[in-house]
Each structure stands twice: as C-alpha cells, then as structure tokens.
Amino acid sequence: MQILQGKKIVLGITGGIAAYKTPELVRRLKDQGADIRVVMTTAAKAFITPLTLQAVSANAVSDSLLDSQAELAMGHIELAKWADYILIAPATADAIARITCGMANDLLTTICLATSAPIAIAPAMNQQMWHASITQENIEKLAARKYQIFGPGAGEQACGDVGLGRMLDVDDLVTLTCQFFQSNTTLNQVDLSGQTWLITAGPTREAIDPVRYISNHSSGKMGYAIAQAAKLAGAQVQIISGPVNISTPKGCEKIAVESALEMHQQAIKLAKNADVFVACAAVADYRVSNIAEQKIKKSADEMHIHLVKNPDIVADVAALKIKPFTVGFAAETQNVEHYALGKLKRKNLDMIAANNVALAGQGFNSDDNALMVFSKNSKTELPLASKHVLAAQLVELISQHQIEK
Ligand code: PMT
C-alpha cells in the first residue's frame, strides 16, 4: 500500500551535514508513491549536489529565487501552489529563524511564505544551538502557527557533542509524513513525555530439543511500530521482544527473550513501573513439557510431543495490584469481534486490538494491517493502513482512554 500515492511534496534542504541523508529520504518518500520536487539553499549545495537529488527525485532541482528562466513562469509561486506538503529536512537554526521571521530572501523561505500547504520542519543543528533560547522561541512560534516539528533526535553529533539536535532518521521522517496524510491527527498532538510504555512484540520460541522449536509467523512489525509511535510521542519505551529480524526503533530499549516463560518473567518485572502495557507478541499458548537435552533422533514412524500451558502474560500483568493501562491484541481467523470481547473480559484488559489474521495482505508478517479496537464501552475501527500509521492511531486511542480512566 503506497500511502503517499499522488501526493506532491516539496523537500526543502538547507545547509546541514544531515543533508547527506536526503537522497535516501527522497527515495523512501518516492517508494510510498510521492512526487518529490527538491528545493535547495545555497548552503545545502555545499553538502550534497543538486545533480544527485535530481537523479533520485527524477525532477529538476530548484535552487535560486533569481533564476530568470524559472521565474518566467513565476517558479516560486508555481512550486508554492503545486505542493500538497512541504518538508524541510534538514532545517538549520538559520533557516528556522528566517522562516519564523517571515523572511523571503531565498527560494525556500519564499515558498514557505507563498504556500497554503502544511509545512513540516526537521531541525538539525548542534545541541547548544538547539537549546539556545532564541531557537526554542522560534520553534514555539512555528509550532503555534501549526508547523509540524519533527524531532530533533538525540545522540552523538557531527561536531562531537552529544545531545538533542540530530535530524530524525529517514525512517522516522517518512513515517511522520505518512501519518500526516493518513490521519487527521498527528503524534505531535499526543504528548507521552514522562510516561513509560512496555510493549511485547514478535513471536516466542518453545524449544523441543537443542535444534528445534515451536513458533509462529510474527515478524515483530506491528509491535515495533507501536513502540516507535510511542517513542515519537515522547514516551520512554521498552520492548520485550521474541526473535525478529527488524531493527529496534531508535531510542527504544529492547529486552530480547526467546520463550513465553522468559517473556512472562520480564513482563511481570517491568510492568510494575510502566504506565502502559501493550501485549502485541504472538505468545505460544503451550510449551514442551520436557525439552530434550540432546537432538532427538529419528526412529519410530510417529512421535508425540507433550505440551503444557504457558502462563498468560497479559492476563497476569492485568492482575497486578499496581497495574499499567493494559492493552491486549487478539489474532483471530473467525468471529473476530466475539472472540476479542471474550478476551477483553476474561483477561481483565482495559483495551483490546483485534486483527483478522486470515485475510491476505494484513496480520502476520505483512506491512499493513487493520484493527478493531474495543474497550468496555467503545468500539473503534482502524481500517487497512500501514502498520506505522495504525500504530500512531492506536497510540493516540490508548492515550485518550488512559486519560479518561
Ligand atoms: O508481528 P507481526 O508480523 O507484525 O504481526 C502482528 C500480530 C498479528 C502478531 C499482532 O497484530 C497480534 O495479533 N498479536 C497478538 C497475537 C496473539 O498471540 O494473539 P492471541 O489472540 O493468541 O492472544 C491474545 C492476547 O494474549 C495477545 O495480546 C497476546 O500477546 C496475549 N498472550 C497470549 C498467550 C499468552 N500465553 N500470553 C499472552 O500474553
């Protein structure tokens, strides 16, 4: 599913070292179906060439307000009107200051002034420059004017400093851009700062012998997307994860486990300090009662494996004396609503997100999903969308219900 199909996006690139990431950003936005026109400032061209961006965007790059050829057709106004959305990444302190003041002294700032399209800004600068009160005032003013502020992230900087000011990763920028187009709300409006979210994700593996196990098709994509969405909204996020092949969202802590028993132990330990617990993992309901110490040899025509029930992780978290707001998932192949409501009640959950895992193109191991979310007295349908978009919608829904509780 291409979320940005037919969307016209102006990517403004200003002069920061993170400009070297923009060809990848263009490619990833195009992967989602967007048509990209790149506008570069003079300083941006010191970090990356217009030719590279022209090649990846498959469109001419604009870089001058005083380009007599382009201005024959009023180039700056044409681009300002063409855009459905303007993303400025990286946005330097200087560019942010000029935009805040309403200056129009280059093509990019002029387009910002002349457009009615929403504008998102991905700040990228030295941590001291980011923390400078004048930069913070500028950001506050832009946010108050409904500019979206994507990031910045924290970490080691090109100058050797450590702190806030890094441009968000390309993945995060693409996700946030997609979220803008998919939902009327954005994670910018959900503030989870000060909260801890604990999320289980991926499959569990129940060993049979040292080389074999029982597992399922969970890829971890849904759980990791929820983790990323909660992190982007400001929460501290821990993921208790079964074995998966996807990377941990930036800034989230991953606790790697294999079996349901290990996942259970970690969940009970960490849930006491969590505000929200989301059980997205596909946990094996049963485990092998006697795991063979050595590889089982082939002999008889039939073999039987004796299984015993695993503890129910989400039900045990919901039964804690001091419990987090507890959200379960229900993976069903039939009677989705009926079974999900049964699990909501039986496990004493605050909320449950049900998905039909029998339908093609959603559920286990796909990039998209659709959810029906139930609480005791509400039902919300989240139609087919990328797991990242659904995750943002689910995080917002959880946050609303958590406040109401
Ligand atoms: O990982 P992906 O490939 O992205 O796929 C996502 C998903 C399909 C795995 C996900 O959307 C999903 O449905 N996760 C829950 C899978 C599941 O185990 O569902 P269930 O209906 O069997 O379990 C109900 C709830 O109880 C779930 O929250 C589950 O995590 C929890 N559970 C189940 C058994 C157990 N022993 N302990 C548990 O906590």
Image (cartoon, helix red, strand yellow):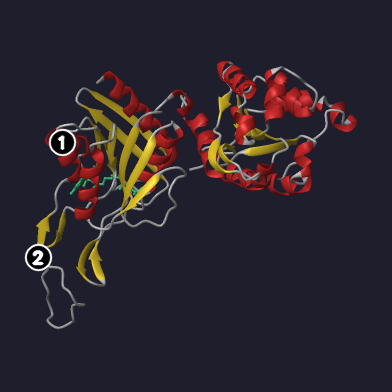
Give residue 113's quadrant in the image. Answer: top right
| Of callouts 1 and 2, the N-terminal one | 2
Q: Is residue 208 visible?
A: yes
Image position of 342 with respect to 140: above or below: below
- Determine crowd level at label 2: few under 14, some 14-19, many 20+ residues with C-alpha closer than 10 A: few
Q: What residue is disc 2 on?
A: 306
Q: Amino acid at mark 1?
A: Leu
Q: Position of residue 330 (x, y in %)?
A: 24, 41
For the point 36% across and 53% down, which residue is it?
219
Q: Which residue is mark 1?
A: 320
Q: Picture coordinates of residue 337 (x, y %)?
A: 21, 35
On the image, the x and y values in percent for residue 237 come to 37, 39
Give residue 338's quadrant in the image: top left
Residue 16: image x %, image y %? 70, 39
Q: Residues within 10 Å of mark 1 (few under 14, many from 20)?
A: few
Tag in front: 1 or 2? 1
